[in-house]
Image (cartoon, grey):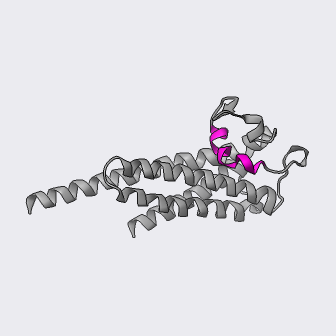
Amino acid sequence: MVVLKRVVLFVLLAFGIGMLVVHGVNPLYLPVKAVTATIWGVLLAVSLLGLRVKGPAGPILLTTGSLLAVDIAVIADSAMLYDITGIWRLDGGVPLPYEYSPLWAPAALWPADTVFGVPQAAVMAGDFEWQGEQVTPIAMVLVMLSLIFVAVSLSQRRGSVAVTGSVEASA
């Protein structure tokens, strides 16, 4: 129950902060941001399964899962804004470059000309306003919240391990 409350809290934070940081409180974007935050939250909850793995692999799986949740949420957010609702369009009416979609969030947060050997212009279909106004803010909000979520989850895991260890030692 505590985990569910924590995930719901983080989804609400993602929705609220995502709305304020990315677009302000514009009713047009409310459904899109609600779905984006929900997708991210569900995937974040699934990433908690990584903590069932003992040793250092558990925290690595949790962190990787939370970053993948960000990536998938960013892809869903852009797909909803551009292709599903048609609220926004890329410069020149070009389609979203879905072949590079796994790189959208990392490219938005990486200030280099290439990301994993792929030019930024290709990843962003030449529309750097899309990256700066849409992808970067939502990716930044979700990454920060994901890292806080991971830190809280790991600290609670350590606390429960310490409590469990002391109970076993005294028994």
Query: Is residue 63 magenta-colored?
Result: no
Instruction: Please state which of residues 70 and 119 is positioned toward the viewer in this rendering.
Output: 119
In the rendered view, tell whether residue 99 sits above or below residue 27: above
Left or right: 92 as drawn, with respect to 68: right
Looking at the image, which residue is at 63% across and 47% down? 139
Hey, which residue is sitting farthest top in the picture?
A: 113
At which x and y percent is residue 165?
A: 18, 56
Hey, which residue is sitting farthest left in the picture?
A: 171
At which x and y percent is residue 48?
A: 43, 59
Left or right: 138 as drawn, with respect to 1: right
Q: Which residues are magenta?
A: 97-109
Magenta residues, dominant SS class:
helix
Query: Is residue 100 magenta-colored?
Result: yes
Left or right: 65 as drawn, with respect to 16: left
Q: How many marks?
A: 0
User: If the image is split into quadrants, where does the C terminus sit?
Assistant: bottom left
Hey, which residue is sitting farthest right in the picture?
A: 92
User: If the image is split into quadrants, where does the N terminus sit?
Assistant: bottom left
